[in-house]
Image: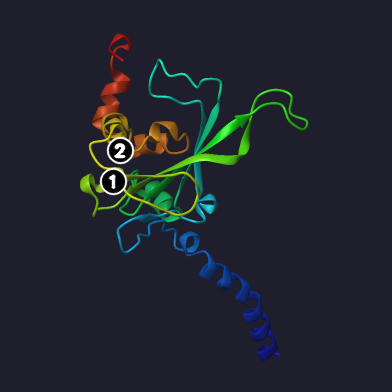
Amino acid sequence: MLRSALLLLLVALLPQQENVRSYPDIAEGVGQSYTTEGQFKMPEHYREWVFLTSGVDMSYSPKASMMGHSMFDNVFVNPSSYRAFLQTGTWPDKTTLVLEIRGAEGASSINKNGHTQSPEIMGIEVHVKDAKLEGGWGFFEFDAPKGTAKVVKRPASCYECHESHAAVDTTFVQFYPTLLALAKTKGTLSPAYLKEINAPATDR
């Protein structure tokens, strides 16, 4: 009887173990892998990670125009780094954040107002924390959720913008509604961000 019960338990566990082997970036919560030439490999299963936020038509320039093309920005982070953030209010080394850009679609099916996201991905930007990179963080740009990419070289405007305005550790936690209050409680909001939000309206 005991032997039969053990066999049934092993059979029940086998599919789960296979899933772990098939999706290591989910099971281990790690999203960084490089080629021998140092190019970053796109995390294959990032959509199984923790979803942080979605923005519509976001721009850091007051004069920016979307030229009639609305866009959604979806942000995901690898699970182990998310769990670490919940404990510390900041990101550990090997954190990987994926910004997925999709078009905004109008009326379709039963939807008559507002926007839904397009099936097609318009672009992907990956922001990684890696002590081996200059400045400890790097950006990688992809046209599709596959393949490899070289690091965006400094000085590029994305680095200056994130280092000057990010709420936590060069990341825009101010746009992550589930994490901003936690970072405030942990006391990890950056001095630059605190100065920015406390500045008089005329100085912004």
Graded by Cα atoms within 10 Å as few (under 14), some (14 to 19) or many (20 or more), the crowding at tag 1 reads: many
Residue 28 is left or right of residue 71, and the answer is left
View extreme (top): residue: 202
Q: Does residue 202 sit above or below 4 in this rendering? A: above
Label placed on residue 180: none
Residues marked 1 and 2 touching at CB (< 8 Å): yes
Q: Amino acid at mark 2?
A: Thr
Report the mark closest to the observer, 1 or 2.
1
Residue at point 67%, 89% (across, down): 2
Under circle 1, the secondary element is: strand
- Give the labeled residue for mark 1: 137
Measured in 3D between alpha carbons, the distance from the residue under mark 1 to the one under mark 2, in whole angstroms, is: 8 Å
Front residue of this view, candidates 103 and 177: 103
Q: Amino acid at mark 1?
A: Trp
Task: Count all numbered tags in the image, as a single digit.
Answer: 2
Q: Is residue 26 left or right of residue 60?
A: right
- Residue 147 on image: x %, y %: 45, 54
Q: Which residue is mark 2?
A: 170
Q: Residues within 10 Å of mark 2 (few under 14, many from 20)?
A: many
Locate residue 186 relative to residue 155 in the image: left or right.
right
Position in image of residue 22 (x %, y %): 54, 68
